[in-house]
Image: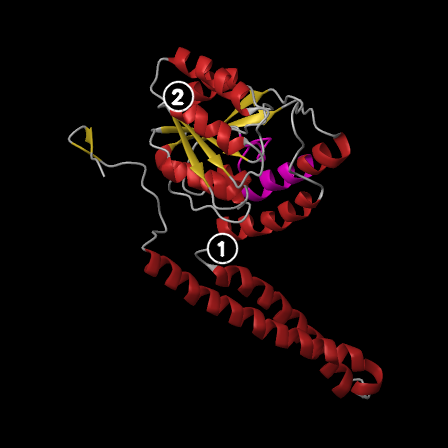
């Protein structure tokens, strides 16, 4: 289990005892990996005390507050299990629902994603922006789930460890994983009102999510072929500029009009569109070069293999 922590001193011990009760009843080996993201309260002291008494508890202490995505990434990198569960530590996620996620993974899914079917958040500040963002993400990614934002998810280790997280992309992991061919299922979960502390999210998060949507769409569709993205916009501008210029020429030579007097602004628009077209196409070509450098220098492949079998057995490595 990976649990990002930021000033959750009031809820840590309650969460820990609930997790112990649930995880010990499942009958599988487990670890609880708490990632402290620069807390300024007593969270670290409590976690050190808990870790000293229970060898199944591990603590990663970040040097400062890097954000939830970074905390999750650190936990995913350090996790040692074949299935990795992630959840918030503010008691808004119910540990007793963990077996539901494991059942989905056992059914063959690569990701089991929580779905807060009945939200307990503020209607205008949280639920409406979340509903809009989720519908946009569903449309842009093609992943048919209702709730991209919740942290409560279960992953096969080989899937989540193959995704590089940065920025605020943790909420879009199902979309990023789907581009690798991962199978995603939803698990309806409770959304419990926060009892301790205060939420670290605000309305400003909605703006960041909107920008992240654009980024994720680009990563999913155009990372390996940026010229298709910029080239299309360049082609539209080129056709618009050419059509406008052709119309001005007809007016000049057929209608005998003075171009600058009759169509001065339109002429400038035509020239501007042609210039912008050249810029977009140039950006696409530069993007193609950079994507080749990215894939070749990092050793990253443009495909993902689920497994290799020979003689009825799966090869390791």
Q: Nearer the viewer, mark 2 or mark 1?
A: 2
Residue 218 coordinates in the image, percent (x, y): 53, 53
Q: Which mark is on residue 294?
A: none
Q: Are marks 2 and 1 in contact (CB under 8 Å)?
A: no
In this rendering, does residue 91 appear at all?
yes
Give how far across and how far down residue 152 sits, in percent. 52, 28
| Quadrant the C terminus occupies | top left
For mark 2, what is the residue?
Answer: 53
Toward the viewer: 262 or 307? 307
In the displayed structure, 212 sits above or below 270; it is above
- For label 2, count other residues whose C-alpha is less than 10 Å away and answer few (under 14), some (14-19) or many (20+): few
Tell me the quarter of the picture where residue 8 sits: top right
> Residue 166: image x %, image y %?
49, 48
- Dot placed on the residue nearer the N-terminal end, 2 or 1: 2
Quick one: label 1, few (<14), some, or many (20+) residues within 10 Å?
A: some
Residue 315 picture quarter: top left
Magenta region, residue range? 131-151
Residue 153 appearing in the image: no
Quarter of the view holding residue 192: top right
- How far apart in space, not on screen, are marks 2 and 1 (Cα)? 49 Å
Coloration of the structure image: secondary structure
Left or right of 294 in this view: 317: left
Magenta segment: does it hold 149? yes
Q: Nearer the viewer, residue 48 or 122?
A: 48
Name the residue tied to disc 1. Answer: 222
Q: Position of residue 123 (x, y in %)?
A: 75, 30
């Amino acid at each position: 289990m990976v649990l990002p922590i930021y000033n959750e001193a009031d809820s840590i011990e309650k969460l820990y005892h609930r997790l112990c009760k649930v995880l010990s009843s499942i009958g599988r080996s487990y670890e609880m990996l708490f990632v402290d993201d620069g807390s300024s309260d007593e969270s670290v002291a409590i976690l050190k005390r808990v870790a000293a008494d229970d060898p199944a508890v591990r603590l990663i202490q970040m040097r400062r507050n890097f954000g939830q995505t970074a905390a999750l990434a650190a936990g995913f990198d350090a996790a040692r299990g074949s299935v990795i569960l992630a959840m918030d530590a503010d008691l808004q996620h119910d540990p007793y629902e963990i077996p539901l996620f494991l059942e989905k993974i056992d059914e063959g899914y690569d990701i089991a994603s929580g779905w807060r079917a009945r939200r307990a958040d503020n209607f205008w500040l949280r639920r409406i922006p979340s509903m809009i963002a989720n519908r946009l993400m569903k449309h842009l990614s093609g992943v048919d789930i209702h709730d991209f934002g919740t942290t409560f998810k279960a992953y096969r280790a080989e899937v989540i460890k193959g995704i590089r997280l940065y920025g605020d992309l943790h909420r879009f992991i199902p979309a990023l994983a789907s581009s690798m061919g991962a199978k995603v299922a939803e698990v309806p979960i409770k959304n419990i009102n926060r009892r301790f502390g205060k939420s670290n999210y605000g309305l400003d998060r909605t703006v960041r999510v909107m920008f992240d949507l654009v980024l994720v769409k680009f990563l999913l569709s155009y990372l390996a072929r940026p010229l298709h993205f910029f080239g299309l916009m360049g082609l539209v501008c080129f056709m618009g500029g050419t059509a406008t210029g052709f119309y001005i020429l007809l007016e000049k030579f057929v209608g005998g009009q003075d171009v600058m007097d009759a169509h001065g602004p339109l002429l400038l628009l035509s020239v501007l569109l042609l210039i912008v077209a050249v810029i977009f196409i140039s950006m696409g070509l530069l993007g193609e070069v950079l994507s080749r450098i990215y894939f070749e220098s990092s050793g990253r492949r443009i495909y993902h293999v689920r497994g290799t079998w020979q003689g009825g057995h799966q090869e390791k490595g």
